[in-house]
Amino acid sequence: MARVFISIGSNVDRETNFRRGLDALRQHFPDYLHSSVYESEAVGFSGNPFYNSVFAMETSLPLEELCALLKQIERDHGRKPSDKKFSPRTLDLDILLYDDIVCDVPAQLPRHEIEKNAFVLQPMAEIAPDLVHPVTGVTLAEMWQQYDKTQQKLWKVEFPT
């Protein structure tokens, strides 16, 4: 079984789409950890604020099959394959870590957003503070402690899960 961390994000009808995405993940992976939900400003483009969180679970799915499943869940919830990278999203599901695998295909692992974006790092550090990043060799708690929190604004929101 692989230990996997997935980021969940939405800024288009975000409450509805975020909830639907979370529910779909729960259906496939009923034994999970889920961080608090955070609101953050759009990064890389002008757009509505996002809801973000991190979902952690174990799976026997190979990495390629998990990637395909997440893309299908995104499409089932209104995301189009033609959507630009930095644009509004109904649902964004990205694998952040898949065990300690380091690769670029079929997904960039570990995902660079862990180090760059508060909306990924803070929820990861919340649910797995002692986890060591496979490239930096630093725990997520230490990474969050060292992160420049003036870069991006982030607010915890009440979101019944």
Image (tube, rainbow, N blue to C red):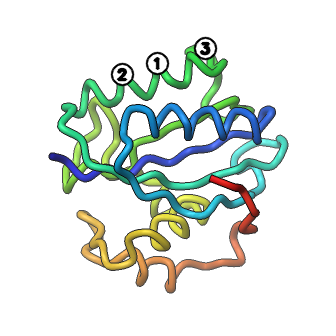
Relative vertical location of residue 11 with respect to residue 150 in this rendering, above or below = above
Q: Position of residue 144 (x, y in %)?
A: 50, 78
Q: Is 74 placed left or right of 78 in the picture?
A: left
Q: Are marks 1 and 2 in contact (CB under 8 Å)?
A: yes
Quadrant hosting residue 89: top right
Q: Are marks 3 and 1 in contact (CB under 8 Å)?
A: no
Quadrant hosting residue 151: bottom right
Q: Secondary structure at mark 1?
A: helix
First-in-chain label (3 vs 1)? 1
Q: Amino acid at mark 2?
A: Ala
Give the residue number, with chain letter if any, for mark 3: 82
Q: Amino acid at mark 1?
A: Gln
Give the residue number, with chain letter if any, for mark 1: 72
Number of the front mark, 3 or 2? 2
First-in-chain label (3 vs 2)? 2
Q: Nearer the viewer, residue 11 or 135?
A: 11
Q: Position of residue 98 (x, y in %)?
A: 26, 48
Give the residue number, with chain letter if any, for mark 2: 68
- Disc 2 crowd rating (10 Å Cα; few below 14, some 14-19, many 20+) is few
Q: Residue at x 49, y 57 (%)?
A: 34
Q: Is 135 placed left or right of 46 in the picture?
A: left
Quadrant hosting residue 81: top right
Q: Look at the image and tell me whether residue 115 can be seen.
A: yes
Q: Residue at x 58, y 55 (%)?
A: 53
Q: CA distance from mark 3 to mark 2?
A: 16 Å
Number of the front mark, 3 or 1? 1
Q: Amino acid at mark 3?
A: Ser
- Disc 3 crowd rating (10 Å Cα; few below 14, some 14-19, many 20+) is few
Q: Nearer the viewer, residue 7 or 103?
A: 7
Q: Secondary structure at mark 3?
A: loop
